[in-house]
Image (cartoon, helix red, strand yellow):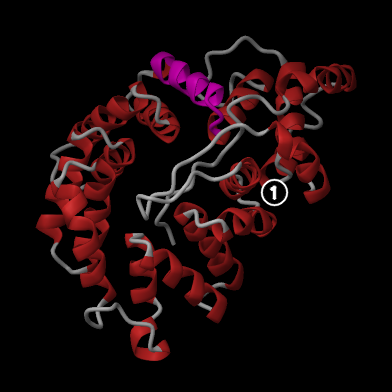
Amino acid sequence: MSMIRFKATVALAALTLSFLVPPTALALDDEAQAAKNEGMRLYNTHQRTTSMPYLEIAANAGDVEAMYYLVEAHRLRHLGMTQAALEWYHRAAQQGEPHAMLRLYDGSACELGDVCPEDGNDWREAALEATMPKAEAGDADAMGALYDIYNYLDQYDEAMEWLLLSAEAGNLDSMNWLGQLARDDEKNYATEAERLEAAAKWYRKAAEAGHAPSMSYLASTLNSLGRSEEAWQWMVKASEVGNINGRQWLATCYIDPQESELCHAEKDPAQGWAIFLAINEEISSTSSERALRVYHDTVTPEQREEGERMMEEWLNREPPLSYFPDKFGF
C-alpha cells in the first residue's frame, strides 16, 4: 500500500488500541491505528523498510509496540545499533518495554552511549525490575518476557520456570517456544520419536488455540512422526490463518502431490499456480519468485492461464499473509 493510498483509506479505519503505558493515555486515533496496522502487516511479511513510515506514525502517537517494531526494522535494516535506533529503544524502554531494554544492553548503550536506566547501569536488571511485578500479578506476556530476561542474566532455571508459567497462563508464544525447545533437545529424550511427541504436545496446545506458527510446526512434526494425513490438515489450517509456509505448501501440493508425503491434496496445477501468483503479488519475495520458476514447466500453458484467472480468489485474504516473526529474534 502506498502512502497516498493509505491516506485515502484512513477514514475507513475504526480499530483502536489502548496504550500499554501510561494507564491514563488515550487510544490511538483512527489514522495512527490504521498506520500501525499497515506497518505491522508489512513488518510481518519482512517488508521492513517499507513498514517504517507507517510504524513511525503510530510510534510518534505514543504506541509502545509500534516504537519497538519500528526500531527493530531500523536495526535490521542497518545491521546493528545506530543513534536513531538507540533513541527509539530508549523511548520504548522508558515506557516499560523489557525487550527494548535488552536491546539496549546488547548495544552497550549505558557504557558507550551513556544511556542508562534511572536506577543503575544494567538494562537487564532494569528489565527485570519493570517486568516482575506484572508477572507476579498474573500477566502471561510478562511471564514470557522473564524467560528472555533471566536468560540474559544467565539464570537458566529461573528462565524455564517462568516460560512454563507463561505457557500455563495461556501465552501461545511461550507454548510454541516450549515446542521448539523440545524439538531441538536431543539430550533429554531417549529417542527421536519421544522428542517429537514432546514438541507436538506443546505445538498442538498452541495450535488449537489459534497460534498460526504452531499449526505449521505441528504439521511438520506430525509428518516426521509418520502421521501425514493429520499433518496435512494442520498445514491447511495454517494457510487459512495466513501462515505463509502453510500457503506455500498448499500451492506446492496442488501442483505436485508427489512432492512430499505431507501432501494429501487432489492434483490441481492451475489452483497451485494461482496461489503462488497471489503470494508473489501480495508479497514479492525470493521464495515465491523461485517457486514460479521451478514449477513453470510443470504447469502447462493452459493451466498457467487458468491460474492467472483464479489468482484474485487468493489475493488479500483475511487474515493477511504473515511470516509471524518472533518478537525477540536476531
Q: Please say whether residue 222 is visible from this viewpoint.
A: yes
Q: Residue at x 70, y 28 (%)?
A: 316
- The image shows residue 173 at horizontal and vertical percentages of 33, 40
Q: Secondary structure beneath disc 1?
A: helix
Left or right placement of residue 205 versus residue 59 in this view: left
- The image shows residue 128 at horizontal and vertical percentages of 20, 64
Q: Dividing the picture into quarters, in which one does residue 283 lie?
A: top right
Mark 1 highlights which residue? 286
Q: Which residues are magenta?
A: 229-243
Amino acid type shown at disc 1: Thr
Q: Residue at x 77, y 31 (%)?
A: 277
Neighbour tally class for label 1: few under 14, some 14-19, many 20 plus, Cα within 10 Å: few
Q: Dividing the picture into quarters, in which one does residue 41 lie?
A: top right
Q: Quadrant of the C terminus?
A: bottom left
Q: Residue at x 40, y 30 (%)?
A: 211
With respect to residue 169, does 313 lie above or below? above
With respect to residue 302, does 167 lie above or below? below
Classified by dominant secondary structure, the portion drawn in magenta counts as: helix
Q: Dividing the picture into quarters, in which one does residue 78 lie?
A: bottom right
Residue situated in front as seen by the camera: 191 or 91 = 91
Taking the magenta stretch, the answer to whether it contains residue 238 is yes
Taking the magenta stretch, the answer to whether it contains residue 24 is no
Q: Residue at x 76, y 37 (%)?
A: 9
